[in-house]
Image: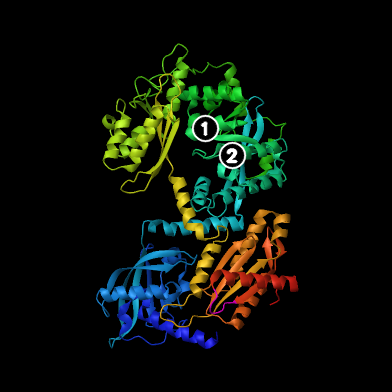
Amino acid sequence: MSSPHSRQFGTSYATTARKGLLFAAGTFRRRVDRSFPDRQSPQVHETTLPYPVPTSVWAWSVNATGIFTASSSASTEMIGYSPADLIGQNVTLVLHAAELRRAYAVTDALGGAGASWRGIFVEAHHRNGTMVWLQTTAKPRYSTNGDIVGCDGTTRLVGPDADSVAEHHRITQRIRSVLTDRSLRTAFQPIVGLAAKSVIGVEALSRFRTDPERIPDEWFAQAASVGLGTRLELLAIDTALTAAEALPEHLYISVNASPTTCLDPRLIDVIALSAVGPGRVVLELTEHDAVADYDELERTLGNLRRMGVKVAVDDAGSGFASFQHILRLRPDFIKLDRSIVTNLDGSPAARALCAAVTAFAGRIGAQVIAEGIETPAELCAVTELGMSAGQGFYLGRPSLLPTEWARWHSAVKATQQVQLAISVLSSGPALDVGTRTSANTTGPIVSSGIAGTSAGTTLQDAGLADAVFAALPDATAVLDRSGRIVAVNRAWQMFAADNGGTPATTGVGVSYLQVCERAAEMGGADAAAVATGLRAVLCGSVKQSNREYSCDSPSVNRWFVSRITAIEAPSGGAVVSHININRRRRAELENQQQALHDPLTGMANRVLFTKRLAAALDARPGCQIRADVGVIFVEIAALAEVNRTDGYAAADEMLMETASRIHGQLNQRDTLARLGAGRFAVCVTRTNARHLQRLANSIAQTLAGTHTIHGHQVGSGATIGTYLAGQQDTASPSLQAAEQAMYAVRHALPRAIPA
């Protein structure tokens, strides 16, 4: 195709876009300039809005030719473009011509030209390549002689996820900035051996330079919500093990990792390549949800253990999952949650739970570490109960200072106050582990308790059973063999109250089977499935039944798993738990949304690129001749070497920097994709052979420069092939042709294409 074809297409596209100016502003049809330039003329200098607008509303203005003349900052969060990106650009930057035509038709149906309108819906292009739904209100702006000279409008996100889109964008940018800049520091908190009265290890705690007011747990939770949780955890572990070189050599280093991160093959590389030997590393499992596949997790941890890595279960006693971790993984360390240790000296129920965990740890060869020790009385309590180590502000605060770390060498005992507190045990009164008093406890939730009264059951066992049952964070009920509720915990009572239940309808003495059956009769498909699973468990045909279901309140969407487990005892019955899986469901939804984008660079992936290329190659409605479309195929030459010599984190940085440099050379209507490893592709629209080659040379030139990776300069370079699609070409063959051109260049000239 020749360049006149491009000019003919541009004219047709301009006419189409003009008719639907500014999100279907049909008001412009009366006196609109026939021209529709790509850029605003130099005479336009409007940049700010003369009135304040809420940050959740994007306010904008355009002139008569469809050029943005003003924009509020909300555009950045809503569609990814800042005011500086938009001002001077045509509305077609964010709206496709077909969408403009559709909006124009809607405007005509709502009253035709010349009138103000509100509430029209459009699908717009986000800068990251996704599509977002917007609701727009617009009003024409008139000159003194009655001519329409522009339009002012406001736009809001719409849809069930509208409120979260802007926040998702902010979180993603914030986390990516941390990953790119490696803006983490590590504070170490001492772990004190209570027998030796000296520091035996440390826990690595991340500190974020960019926003020190935001607590670390919030950073990691937000990273997980946007699919970057594992990358942030790996960066935190890598940073911690690097900082640990300054620690005394006898100390072990405990780092936090979710089961998902433990399963990531990159974790082994991070530990193996660190200056700290694997024998000094302890992995603390931090996940509070149940693990889907313990067999896979056990295999992975087995490989790490063979390297010398030890395993700890964090937050033991805080919920169902931590006990599952202990039973299945047989950890080397069990870290009691601080919520149990707090006021341990005054809580017989908490002491009973701690005593049982300590006894169990002794049977499996694990050590118990008490977290959150803040008073001398708490320290005395954990020591008397036989725990081997402790951690908390009373024993030592987290420190960022290597000079303080150096004081933790083996010849130095714990602080004098710690030694004095421990010595009190030899002369002070014994702690009462097995009794409870009404002043310190509220008693069991049901009068019969859940521990039973067999001859072999002690008061301590009963107290432990009540304490564990009451502390479970999941809504849990115990049923007899008929399906009647015989005990519920506090979480069950709160769960029932949140969903309109009462003790008379969902409490002790009520048939839970009948509750499910009544809900099923009212049309609840999930309730019917739960009832079927419950009957199967009660009759012994299955040992466990699980059912995911949504339980929406007027303000939030919630997801749970109903888990029914058979009681393997002569009495029979079952345990029913409703487990909140909101975090997992949100992560799954985020994964679905990100299925068309590369998780590392945020650019399109192969699937989305192929769709975009196919759309560009298709003739546009109303046009007999399509625009020229080209494909540029880029392969980074030095990626494998960087990955081998500097590790995966350095390679990731190079890929992100490469994507940024290529993207900076492109027009907004072009599409950049990462196809995998060090391969990128660009779909170039409205091009010709000369322009395509010039763009390829520009990309080669910008990639020829060095990258600053981990503080030193690394050269990359690239091999680039181009292909200008023919009239009958389709997407996949065009991409393959560009790749073949790249291979031809590589064989002819095994170095980066010169600019």
| Residue shown at the point (39%, 81%) measured from the top left | 16
Q: Amino acid at mark 1?
A: Gln
Q: Check residue 324 in the rendering and tell me which mark sits there, or answer none.
A: 1
Residue 347 appears in the picture as rendered: no
Region of the chain picked out in magenta, as a range: 724-729
Residue 629 image offset from top left, x and y in percent:
54, 77
In which quadrant is the C terminus drawn?
bottom right
Q: Check residue 297 in the rendering and tell me which mark sits there, or answer none.
A: 2
Q: Is residue 573 left or right of residue 369?
A: left
Residue 483 appears in the picture as rendered: yes
Mark 2 burial class by Cα count in 10 Å: few <14, some 14-19, many 20+: some
Residue 242 image offset from top left, x and y in percent:
68, 47
* Nearest-to-viewer mark from 1 and 2: 2
Which one is earlier in the sequence, the residue at label 1 or at label 2? 2
Residue 110: within the magenta? Answer: no
> What secondary structure is the magenta-colored segment mainly?
loop
Return the residue nearer the eye: 668 or 444: 668
Q: Is residue 54 left or right of residue 390?
A: left
